Image (tube, helix red, strand yellow):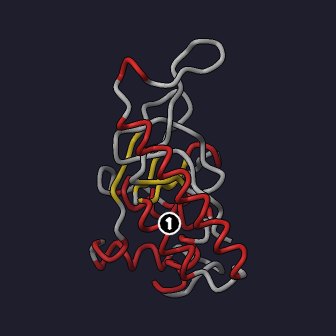
Amino acid sequence: MQLVYTPEGGEERRWDFAPSRLMSVESEMIEGVGGDAWDSWPEFATKFINGNRRAYRAVLWCFLRRENPRLKFNEVVVRVDELTIEFEADETRRAIEENEELTDAERAELLAELDEAEAASTEAQEAPKDEAPESSDGSDTDSPSPQSVSRPGSRSKKAGPSRSSTQPATG
């Protein structure tokens, strides 16, 4: 997955985020800023996957501290629409399948939506450039990539070939 930070008026920044690949001191820093939201790494991970904004901000702080070690957590203040998470399609599929709060019908619907988005992306990528679909106003249309999806509520942004801008909500 990727953490995407786009400060207003600034350049978009991306970091690959694999929680199990953080250094122990970084994971301990994240545990330490949990406040009432989480007390442990597993609790943080659950909050993060479920879209907890403090958890997102904690990860951003961790990455920004690599460049500015004196940066304090409370100095990282972002607008909700400036910070998003993009999940790979397989991560999204796994989250849907493992989400115990979903009914079987909800799970099936979300998986069908994901399959549909992946199929549309594959078709769009396989279409020759001169045969790309056009919108009703004649301009080119952007299709999501089959390999990844964004967190619910995130802004739509066209990214590289391994990123997309849609994801069904997972709970």
Left or right placement of residue 118 versus residue 82 in this view: left
Residue 156 vertical position relative to residue 95 in the rendered view, above or below: above
Circle 1 is placed at which residue position?
92
**Amino acid type shown at disc 1:** Thr
At 54% from the left and 71% from the top, the residue drawn is 49
User: In which quadrant will I find the C terminus?
Assistant: bottom right
Q: Which x, y percent locates residue 42?
A: 48, 86
Q: Position of residue 107 (x, y in %)?
A: 65, 74
**Is residue 92 positioned above or below 37 on the image?**
above
Choose top left, top right, bottom left or bottom right for residue 1: bottom left
Query: Which residue is found at the position 54% from the left and 82% from the top?
Result: 98
Which image quadrant is residue 70 in? bottom left
Place of residue 108 in the rendered image (x, y in percent of width and height, measured from the top left): 64, 72
Q: Residue furthest top?
A: 138
Q: Residue at x 56, y 32 (%)?
A: 8
Q: Secondary structure at mark 1?
A: helix
**With respect to residue 63, does 95 lie above or below?**
below
Q: Nearer the viewer, residue 7 or 35?
A: 7
Near-viewer residue (9 or 48)? 48
Query: Mark 1: few, some, or many residues within 10 Å (few <14, many ≥20)?
Result: many
Q: Position of residue 132 (x, y in %)?
A: 44, 24
Tell me which residue sits at (44%, 68%) in the image: 91
Q: Which of 116 and 63 lies nearest the eye of the viewer?
A: 116
Q: Is 154 situated left or right of 67 in this image?
A: right
For the residue pair 100 and 57, the one nearer the viewer reads as 100
Q: How many marks?
A: 1
